[in-house]
Amino acid sequence: MSAATTRSRTPDRLCAEAVDLARAAAEEAAAPGVIGEHSGLVSEGDRVVTHFFECKELGYRGWRWAVTVARASRAKIVTLDEVVLLPGPDALLAPEWVPWSERLRPGDLGPGDLLPTDQDDLRLEPGYTGEEEPPPNSVVSEEMRELAEAEDADVTPGTPAVQPATPIRGTIASVAEELGLRRARVLSRYGLRVAADRWEEEFGPKSPMAQAAPATCVSCGFLARIGGSLGQAFGVCANEFSPADGRVVSLSYGCGGHSEAAVMPKPPQPAAPVIDETRVDPFPLRPARDSGSVPEAGDDETAELGHS
């Protein structure tokens, strides 16, 4: 950095002496009685100076009225440029504004509230696309064939309590674990019913949140399906802003965070401006002398730009 850029500018003498002009402008812009003492000045450029005055208005502690004055080259008269209220080094400032989408936290959604979702929300994707469906004539992979042939050797004798915690993939033990047959006991019909009643009471259609919801969870993209017989009436909520996030919810439950309740449209993209540079349109600066109308292009009375 050169020495010229680091050296401070010397304020213009006439602009620096125009304290009364700056004070009068500040008193005219501000409320009566809020302009305090002159607290300094700073040079903004050649023949441009900003004067600072203390602000006595309640709620603006540390703020200053900044009045910028200037004068033209070789002129003796100082003129007013602008008046503005600016925070000083010790000013009391409001916290930085944060968009609502970043201020929102899990649990903020209440009954009757709607939480819009973007069309390009990364947490959502189209339902059925068929991309992951295997071809109809696909064969079993070589790995699965080898595991199927060796499944007899992988079966561990004994009761389910002594079976390995993680059976080898493709063995009978792994299939039994998926079906829930490796556990000594499973939920009875009564156990399923009391669990369903408990979940239905907390996150069911009769809850205040569901009564004010725009739609039910059965059509929400944030619903994660569960297997078994309970999957016919329940699922798991995967919306972090929903009060039921990570909880088992009834398919007839609902909240304002429904994925399709208030979808925000994409902002319109204006077309690029088209500039026609193939022709020049003459523009008269004064009307015709006889009729007062604008002369046509090519008329002798048409004035050229830049001349009176």
Image (cartoon, helix red, strand yellow):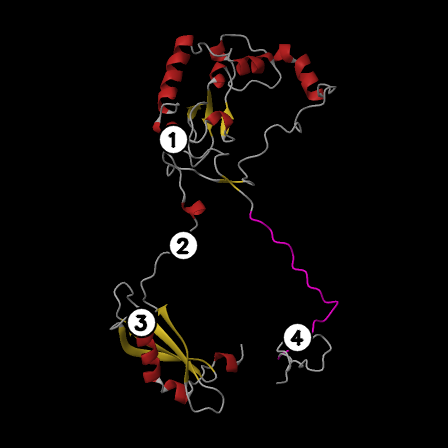
Please state, as top left, top right, bottom left or bottom right, where the C terminus lies in the image: bottom right
Residue 253: x and y in percent read 42, 25
**Which marked residue is nearer to the observer: mark 1 or mark 2?**
1
Relative to residue 270, is residue 196 drawn left or right?
A: left
Seen from the viewer's position, the closer of residues 226 and 153 is 226
Does the magenta stretch mainly form a helix, a strand or a loop?
Answer: loop
Cβ atoms under marks 2 and 3 closer than 8 Å: no
| Of pointers 1 and 2, the one earlier in the residue sequence | 2
Q: Nearer the viewer, residue 33 or 275?
A: 275
The residue tagged 4 is: 283
Q: Amino acid at mark 4?
A: Phe
Q: Quadrant of residue 212?
A: top left
Magenta residues, start to end: 267-286
Checking the image for residue 97, the label placed there is 2
Q: Is residue 20 magenta?
A: no
**Residue 285 placed where, x, y %?**
62, 79
